[in-house]
Image (cartoon, coloured by chain):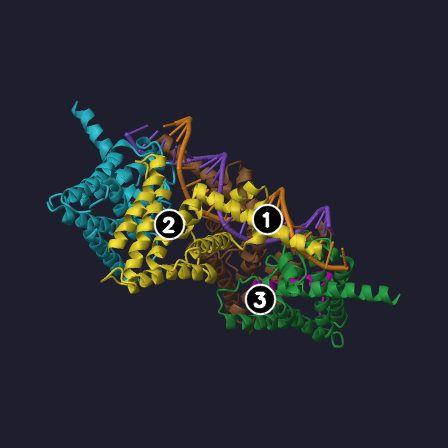
Chain colours: A brown, B green, C cyan, D yellow, E purple, F orange
Amino acid sequence: MGIAERKEREKQELKDKIINAATEIFLEAGADGTSIRMIADRIEYSPATIYLHFKDKNELFNVIMDRAFSLFFQYFSTVLDISEPMERLKALGHVYLKFALENPEFYSLMFIIKEPMAIHRKEENWDLGKRSHDILTQTVQDCINAGYFKGHQSEILSFSIWSTVHGLVSLKICDRMVMYSQIEAEELLSKALESFNEMLERA
Amino acid sequence: MGIAERKEREKQELKDKIINAATEIFLEAGADGTSIRMIADRIEYSPATIYLHFKDKNELFNVIMDRAFSLFFQYFSTVLDISEPMERLKALGHVYLKFALENPEFYSLMFIIKEPMAIHRKEENWDLGKRSHDILTQTVQDCINAGYFKGHQSEILSFSIWSTVHGLVSLKICDRMVMYSQIEAEELLSKALESFNEMLERA
Amino acid sequence: MGIAERKEREKQELKDKIINAATEIFLEAGADGTSIRMIADRIEYSPATIYLHFKDKNELFNVIMDRAFSLFFQYFSTVLDISEPMERLKALGHVYLKFALENPEFYSLMFIIKEPMAIHRKEENWDLGKRSHDILTQTVQDCINAGYFKGHQSEILSFSIWSTVHGLVSLKICDRMVMYSQIEAEELLSKALESFNEMLERA
Amino acid sequence: MGIAERKEREKQELKDKIINAATEIFLEAGADGTSIRMIADRIEYSPATIYLHFKDKNELFNVIMDRAFSLFFQYFSTVLDISEPMERLKALGHVYLKFALENPEFYSLMFIIKEPMAIHRKEENWDLGKRSHDILTQTVQDCINAGYFKGHQSEILSFSIWSTVHGLVSLKICDRMVMYSQIEAEELLSKALESFNEMLERA
DNA sequence: AATGAATGAGAGTTCATTCAT
DNA sequence: AATGAATGAACTCTCATTCAT
């Protein structure tokens, strides 16, 4: 009994090691630069072992994406108890930025990388992605109901807001802020978000 | 003398042929789909010939990026004669969107792709990139001077604006608008930009 | 005692299951398409279990060959009660053709495949092979004794006859009758055998 | 000029080396046992070099088959000037046997091996195969016209004859004559063919 | 008795790159 | 100046087999 549990735990640990290694390499080397062999090398197992845990490269990437969306949703969930909608919306922007900067590899996989092999979004991650998206649109709608954003449609505005924060973090993640020094970059992101938030309040 | 010149000219012609072929294939097949062999095949030279004109694949990609930035700058230049700064700013957003949607592979290479092979930005393209960026910041500054954006700093605001339009187009290019149908997606981009522009005017 | 017997019985039962599964897959997918893992999957045991009962893939294939020869011998046995030797000989040809067409994978393994993994013919199947062969030579000898095949030696003639029927079926099995349409092929085999039989009667 | 010729010759020589090595291994190890790597190893070139001369494994095998059929047709051609049809027919049997025993690897590829990857018979070899086949059927028809084989149809009889000689050689090539010693086997083949020829004359 | 876990070896194929000519 | 020839390294994935438990 204890043995079975230990084995199960060890198995899951190895699976996690694979996912972690894969994610690391994914980030360092990009989608095309991530090979089964490299993953195997990093965890010091043989390539064939990977296939004991994942059907193929696709499945591995899918699982990584599952994880990413799951974590993403956790970040988003932290703002749900803010009752004032505009405050909640601004908080959403902050956790979005936070998630992206703290998990750039995940963010890339989720929103940037051209999925190399038809990664079919599966139920779970797709669902979590949609639910996260719904949190945004619902919050925007709540703002409208509360008198903000006169004359704006929630769907369009949501997309516009998403674009802005996505733009911010993806310029950072894709290393397109080289004209600013490292420190300035981080600061600039915050300030730009603040600036955008102010615009929102006036909109 | 005439001979040397002719030779020099021929050499440059071949180099141009290579660049053209490379660009074509790049636009057709993307960065990963572009191989030296394919380029050589298209111009009916041997792969080795490519290396007489370019140190390696990186250098070739750099030249493609030069072209991309050059074209990008052309798009940008079309708005320079708009004297009213806010009109110019909004026009900039439109041409940015236009460039990205009309040249998505270029856009990817310029602003999205984690440079697959350590592309070292060279003088020229960097310069054009910077000049384009300067057009934006200068326009924002002109707006501030004209009384818009009270309390905003031009650099931060410029970055915020860039982020928004970059966010819009990169979500499209990276195929992250799947929840909207194709037609809706294009329309949504326009509307979101309009919506953002309205916000700017009120900011 | 009863326990030991039960265990022995169970062991044999599992061995049979393996053989059955292996044979099934072999018949479905051919020699190259039969992998240890597939066999294990089908009986819902682990691959390692196969190795508790069979030294290696060779040994398993040998057992399949045993089965094949055993079935082959059953087909042959059906003609033993035909007393008239020439009739018996012709009947032999027919059951040979029948066996081959009804069990092409078995036939391949027995008579065609360059034993993919150095199958050492074991006692039993070898014995049944030899006994089948003896039935043929004995029948030919009976024909000679009955006045047929004047001037022929039974061993040489037997081999010649075997060659003909083997040639017929192996051209079919190895898919070398493509110049004839599918239906024609089956018909041609029958007619060619008939034609050969007539020749035999006149020989 | 001389240089170009020499290069061309060397290129062809390497191509021949590849084909020869491939054919050798093909025979030793069977279709599935023949890998690009093994071929490369044998000729002491890298695997990639193979692909400079052949698009893929298929093409390589096709070329080998071309050669085989071409040689086969040469053997067949030697009997064309025998005017007496029955003599020609018997001679055909002998050259068929001769070809198969002298080139068992080719014979396997042509008539025995289950083509591993959809080898599409190309024009040339297919044509030569058909022409060889036509020589047989025409000869049988000539025999019929000369008064032999009363009551037989040339197509059926041709197939029957082909089957016999194919059966003879394939039992030998597939190593199914183990019950006879090596020397006896060769002798038995000849005698069986003689025996069959006698039957034909009486048919 | 049974197996989960692991692997080395190997498959076909493509690529950027080099170098003697 | 141009290239034909060549290659090492890489890729994903499958297989028969072993062994500690």
Foreground residue, A50 or B46?
B46
Residue A14 visible in the snapshot: yes
Q: Which residue in the structure is indicated by mark 3?
A: A160
Give the letter of the chain under mark 1.
Answer: D
Point out which mark residue D14 bears. 1
Foreground residue, B36 or D78?
D78
Q: Secondary structure at mark 2?
A: helix
Tell me the mark number nearer the camera, choosing from 1 and 3. 1
Label 1 close to label 3 by CB (< 8 Å): no
Q: Quadrant of the C terminus of chain D?
A: bottom left
Residue placed at 19% from the left, 43% from the top?
C140
Label 2 close to label 3 by CB (< 8 Å): no
Main secondary structure of the magenta stretch = helix
Foreground residue, C91 or B173?
C91
Which residues are drawn in magenta?
Answer: B148-173
Q: Which residue in the structure is indicated by mark 2?
A: D94
Can you give x and y, in whole percent of width and height, for residue C101 in the image?
26, 52
